[in-house]
Image: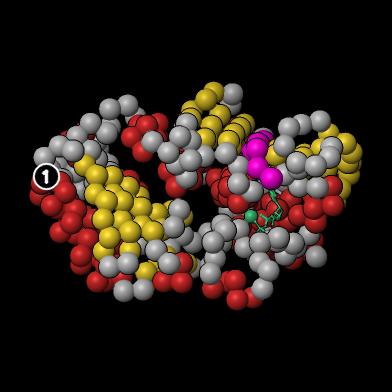
Amino acid sequence: MALANTIAAGEVVERPASVIKELVENAIDAEAKNISIEVHNMGLESISVTDDGSGMTRENLHKAFLRHATSKIFKISDLNDIRSLGFRGEALPSILSVSKIEIMSRTDAGDGYFLKLENSKVVDEGVAVLNKGTKIIVKELFYNTPARFKYMKSEYAEKNAITEIVDKLALSHPTISFKLYMDNKLVKSTLGNNQMNQLIEAIYGKKITEGMKVLSTYLGKIKVDAYLVDPKFVRSKRSDINIFINQRYIKNYVISQSIIDGYQTFLMTNKYPLCLLYITLDPSLVDVNVHPQKMEAKLANERMFAYQLAPEIRKTLESGNM
Ligand code: ADP
Ligand code: MG
């Protein structure tokens, strides 16, 4: 059991940023409105995520650390229609197998409760005082897997990976307020007020939305909302092409390429544009790769969609200021 967890952990818990992704996705699934992330020493000393979501009862806290203890799949056919982000019940036990965890949680009803876990076992528990929601602290990540510990890239690379994950999660959820602290310094903060200009500036910097063009349309049954930043304000990289399908950040080469095509003559010295494309459609028309770390997704009829998208982007960029 413990061994199986450690093996599975290799897939879910590649680096501190992947732990953050799993914990924040749990908070999102619990319908949190405010999520605060605190990281010490690039996540190796501690990662804590605090949310004001549904919380867990004492019994569910215990259950959450059992393998496949997801509360999110009720029947097998749900796998074809994944709406919530987590659906495997693997993240918490996997993270626990390579760290020490303290978690406290409180639901609408009753007292809060805490668990302290080490070596994949509960070592302490009891009543805790907190507001509704959950706070989880992951300590000493990879303390028992020295090989993984050594494999960490530079501090710069790990911090970058963390910021990028939080950026994408915040951009996919405009109605949730996110805060990211690194070594006690607030490095990112979004309001969660559903104001796209404010959100984009909170992530990419003040004034970035000056001259930004917005495209809102339907291509067939697919709803498209694109925020197209003016290339003259940025030096952008491939990962600045943000694609979200049904509130999930994904990678898709065909769609990225059609965005680049649409931007073509506007790119000037940039190779890639900075933009955000939000696609909304029936989940049964999306094929999300279910591997925990892969973020690739395909659309049914993707080539047709990409073919229609490029000229819409070009037209929007050509139009006067909105
Ligand atoms: P999954 O998200 O795939 O269901 P996890 O291992 O990530 O599996 O979490 C296990 C379970 O613990 C979840 O299904 C959920 O019921 C509960 N849980 C985890 N984190 C939270 C949270 N922040 N708020 C409420 N419930 C949570
Ligand atoms: Mg999860």
Do we see residue 173 in this rendering? yes
The front one of 265 and 17 is 265
Horizontally, residue 254 falls left or right of residue 103, namely: left
- Residue range in magenta is 46-54
- Residue lying furthest top in this view? 185
Do we see residue 155 in this rendering? no
Residue 31 on image: x %, y %: 60, 46
The residue to which callout 1 is attached is 319
Q: Is residue 149 above or below residue 262?
A: above
The front one of 216 and 235 is 216
Asked if residue 51 is among those painted magenta in the image, a careful observer would answer yes
Residue 252 on image: x %, y %: 35, 62
Residue 118 on image: x %, y %: 82, 46
- Residue lying furthest bottom in this view? 77
Horizontally, residue 139 falls left or right of residue 235, namely: right
Residue type marked 1: Ser
